[in-house]
Amino acid sequence: MANAERQKRVMAIHDISGFGRCSLTVALPIISACGIETVCLPTALLSTHTGGIDGYTYHDLTGDIMPIFNHWASLGLEFDAIYSGFLGSFEQIDLVGKIFDHYRPKGSFIAVDPVMADNGVLYKIYSPEMAKGMGELCRRADLIMPNITEACFILGVDYQEPPYDEKYIEDLLKRLAVFGAKQVVLTGVCFDNDHLGAASFDADDGVVRYAFTERVEGYFHGTGDVFGSALVASVLNGKSLADASRIAAEYTCGAIKRTVAAGSDRRFGVNFEAGLADLAAQAK
């Protein structure tokens, strides 16, 4: 009997927001549904996400990261990919960099979602020093997936309000590729008021490709994590960067539409769960 194909394994380095559907509570089910073993390294523990919800609890797990990593290393665990997102302190940037350094020589694919800013401003927990450190972490990645604001902070350029033009987007993509990672996906791209999506650039072929979906008005928490997790899962399953971006964009848009149709409280995240079966079929 032929041996079954070896299951891939990814280390997801994100926070845990117990309620609100973002970070690890999104990454774990999405990547797992696509057939990939997902191992969680939490950076912080929150009762809820921080967008529009008051009174949340926050527990910094900086002191736990290296003991967890060292235990895994002692077990000889290997990872096909490392996927990092929100980091809870400046010290964590250096710690995650050390994890990258340990696994890159072993062939692990490094994906970074530099979660730190949106709509032209840094998140409250982030300082300019932390933003610079996150940029340095992006230099060490194979794939990065910033939004427009995060791309501007990484590159040290002025943020522009949407809608954008192709020259602006393509300049950001190519500068980010020169900055470090050879694969770049830029989210929050729009050229008009009716469509929203992502632009991808792979330095190996030098072509910019777009994945647009219908724009749904409003702000929806956790959609960056939904998109990023679907993107990483699709890439690890052998999809091209362009196809992975399209799959992730369509999946995220579907989750948003289901949430709007149900009249759900948008602070509580989007209904990504109902689309998992379709995503798994497309991503594999």
Image (cartoon, helix red, strand yellow):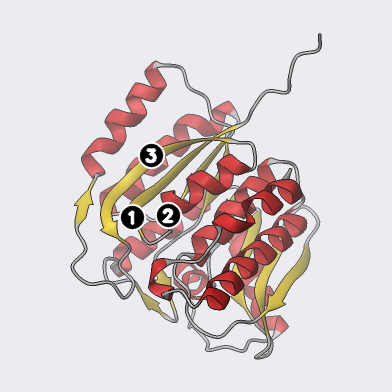
**Amino acid on which the number 2 mark rests in the picture:** Ser
Q: Is residue 53 above or below residue 90?
A: below
The x and y percentages for residue 211 are 73, 69
> Spatial distance from mark 1 to mark 2, Cα to Cα?
7 Å
Label 3 CA crowd tier, 10 Å (few <14, some 14–19, many 20+): many
Image mark for residue 273: none
Residue identifier under label 1: 17
* Pointers 1 and 2 in contact (C-beta within 8 Å): yes
Per the image, label 1 sits on a secondary structure element best described as strand
Work out whether mark 1 precedes mark 3 in sequence or the reverse, and give the earlier one. 1
Q: Residue at x 32, y 53 (%)?
A: 18
Q: Residue at x 63, y 60 (%)?
A: 184
Residue identifier under label 2: 23
Mark in the foreground, 3 or 2: 2
Q: Does residue 141 appear in this view?
A: no
Q: Is residue 62 above or below residue 2?
A: below
The x and y percentages for residue 3 are 75, 14
Q: Does residue 22 appear in this view?
A: yes
**Amino acid on which the number 3 mark rests in the picture:** Leu
Label 2 CA crowd tier, 10 Å (few <14, some 14–19, many 20+): many
Name the quadrant of the C terminus.
Answer: top right
> Spatial distance from mark 3 to mark 2, Cα to Cα?
11 Å
> Spatial distance from mark 1 to mark 3, Cα to Cα?
13 Å
Per the image, label 3 sits on a secondary structure element best described as strand
Q: Is residue 84 left or right of residue 71?
A: right
Q: Residue 17: name its quadrant.
A: bottom left
Per the image, label 2 sits on a secondary structure element best described as loop
Residue identifier under label 3: 41
